[in-house]
Every structure is written in structure tokens, then in C-alpha cells.
Amino acid sequence: MAKPITGAQLNKQWGVGAAHALYIHDGHWYHPLKRFPGALFDRSGYILFQTEKEFRRCPYFSIGKDVSVPKPGISAIPGYVRVVGSPSRPAPYPPEEVAADVSFTEGSVVQIRVNRYERDARARMRCIQHYGPTCVVCGFDFGSKYGQPLSGFIHIHHLKPLASIGKTYRVNPIRDLRPICANCHAVVHRREPPYTVEQVQAMVQAHVHDA
């Protein structure tokens, strides 16, 4: 029999960094958080509260002996971070992205090294909380297009080229990261060095004006 999933387990697996983590599969009932930052998890993602004041003032649930969250659960709360996959097989990044600092060799010739700062769950969450889950280039919103299952889903792009980032670099999610859709993200990385967000925005605007 498989061991039950716990908030502490997901907190560690998904790199959330909460001091107190609680898990309920459907996201409706929790005990109150007691240490902060604290996180509430369901089977698809989580929401992080930096302080007790932020937690208790959240208007999207009621706190008594337990925390009661109306349907569909915590996934409907602004700031919810959707993790693609299930708790037993977590995949906290968009499908074509891979985990931190992993390299692959294809045909013993091409090596791709990914940027861990774009994949850090806490940095992603803060970026999305600030800018919203909408592409800053073209305005695309996965939730508006595909519905609740994709609400809050978006790629995260790092503005600094990987080669310029040192080992001691500390990412600032608001200054250094931007939410960007899959198509625009692909365009940004179409060349080396990558296009800037502003350059791709100009491409989109020029196409709109020419249409």
C-alpha cells in the first residue's frame, strides 16, 4: 500500500520552502497554518502565505477550528501555483522544461543546459503573483483559453542570459523574471543571444498592424 501524501513531502518535492505545509487532495478542508511562510497543497498545486496576517485576511476561505475553502478549492484562489502532474509524479514545470541544472547530450554533439532560476517554484510563484498568469508579450492566458485545469499556468522567462549569471547570483522574481506563453518563449530563444521581451513584443505589434 502506498504511503499517504503529506504537505511536508510536497513542500520538499516541489521546493516551496514553507515552514508549515498542509495537504488535502481536493483542496477544501485544512487545519489552520501555524508557522509561516505556510502553504496549503492539493493534488495539483499549492498556495503560499508569507505571513499569518496574509493567511487570516484571505477572503477566499473561512477560518474557524478548520479552514473551509469553497469549491473548487484552493485552485480558485489568486496566487495558486498549479503544478503540472500528480503528487506521486510531480512535474512542476511546463512539459518541455526540465529540472534544475540538468544537462542532456543528443548524438554526443548537442548539449543543453537549463536555467535553474526559471524553474524554482518559489521564484515562479512570486513572479506570477506580481505579474499575473498572462503572457507579457502577447497577453495570452491559458486559463481563459482552456479553462480551470490550466488556470494559473504559464512559462517563466529569465531576462538575464544564463552565461552572465554566477553561482552566487540571487534571483529577484519581479526584476529578473517574466511570465510568458509557450509560443513567445520559443520565439525569445529562437536565436543566441535570445531576443529580448521588448523585441518580441515589437514583432507581435508589427504583425497586428500589418494584418
Image (cartoon, helix red, strand yellow):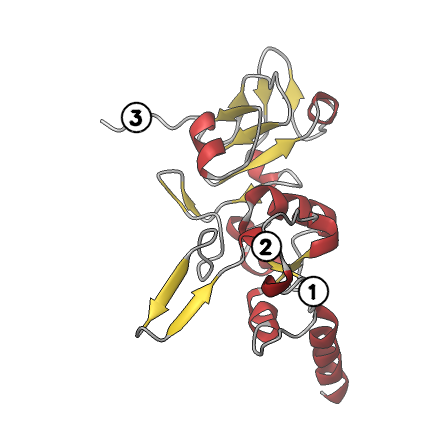
Disc number at residue 139?
A: 1
The quarter of the picture where residue 129 lies is top right
The front one of 208 and 190 is: 190
- CA separation, marks 2 and 3? 32 Å
Left or right, 11 with reference to 117: left
Instruction: Identify the amino acid type marked 2.
Output: Gly
Residue occupied by mark 3? 3
Work out whether 94 lies above or below 4: below
Which of the two discs, 2 and 3, labels the residue nearer the N terminus?
Answer: 3
Residue occupied by mark 2? 143
The quarter of the picture where residue 79 lies is top right
The residue that appears at 71% across and 28% down in the rendered structure is: 58
Work out whether 8 lies above or below 181: above
Q: Quadrant of the N terminus?
A: top left
Q: Position of residue 211 (x, y in %)?
A: 71, 87
The residue that appears at 57% across and 72% down in the rendered structure is: 189
Q: Position of residue 152 (x, y in %)?
A: 60, 49
For mark 2, give the secondary structure: helix
Instruction: Identify the amino acid type marked 1.
Output: Gly
Work out whether 165 lies above or below 184: above
For mark 3, give the secondary structure: loop
Can residue 43 be seen?
no
Disc number at residue 4?
A: none
Instruction: Identify the amino acid type marked 3.
Output: Lys
The front one of 136 and 9 is: 9
